[in-house]
Amino acid sequence: MSKRVEATCDDCYFRRASLCALVGDMPCPTFRACARGTLTPPRQPRLVARPVRPLQHATA
């Protein structure tokens, strides 16, 4: 089994580009992984289409 590597502020794009204004070494909510010197967008959840239901007409 492989162990998950904890993300650190040193792995953050903003810290590496000297754009981080926060003090400390805990990753913040704006953490973005630095990959090859570029800003990596956050992962988005996969969109799943809902099944289409026929319209129900209201009766008086």
Image (cartoon, rainbow, N blue to C red):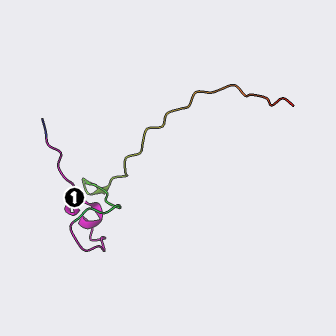
What percent of the width, then of the height, locates residue 18? 26, 71
Circle 1 residue = 11
Find the residue positioned furthest to the right. 60
Residue drawn at x 31%, y 57% is 32
Is 12 one of the magenta-colored residues?
Answer: yes
Q: Quadrant of the C terminus?
A: top right
Q: Quadrant of residue 33?
A: bottom left
Residue 24 painted magenta:
yes
Q: Position of residue 6 (x, y in %)?
A: 19, 53
Q: Quick one: label 1, few (<14), some, or many (20+) residues within 10 Å?
A: some
In which image quadrant can residue 46 be found? top left
> In what quadrant of the picture does the N terminus appear?
top left
**In the displayed structure image, the side of residue 31 where residue 50 appears, left or right:** right
Q: What residue is drawn where x is 42% and y is 42%?
A: 45
58 over 21 or under it: above or below: above
Determine the secondary structure under disc 1.
Answer: helix
Q: Which residues are magenta?
A: 3-25
Q: Residue at x 31, y 74 (%)?
A: 21
Name the residue: 31% across, 59% down: 31
Residue 20, relative to residue 43: is it above or below? below
Residue type for callout 1: Asp
- Find the residue positioned furthest to the front: 60
The tally of labels here is 1
Counting from the top left corner in percent of width and height, residue 48 is at 49, 33
User: Is 11 or 39 nearer to us in this picture?
Assistant: 11
Q: Between 58 and 9, which is closer to the camera in this rendering?
A: 58
Q: Main secondary structure of the magenta part?
A: loop
Q: Position of residue 58 (x, y in %)?
A: 80, 31
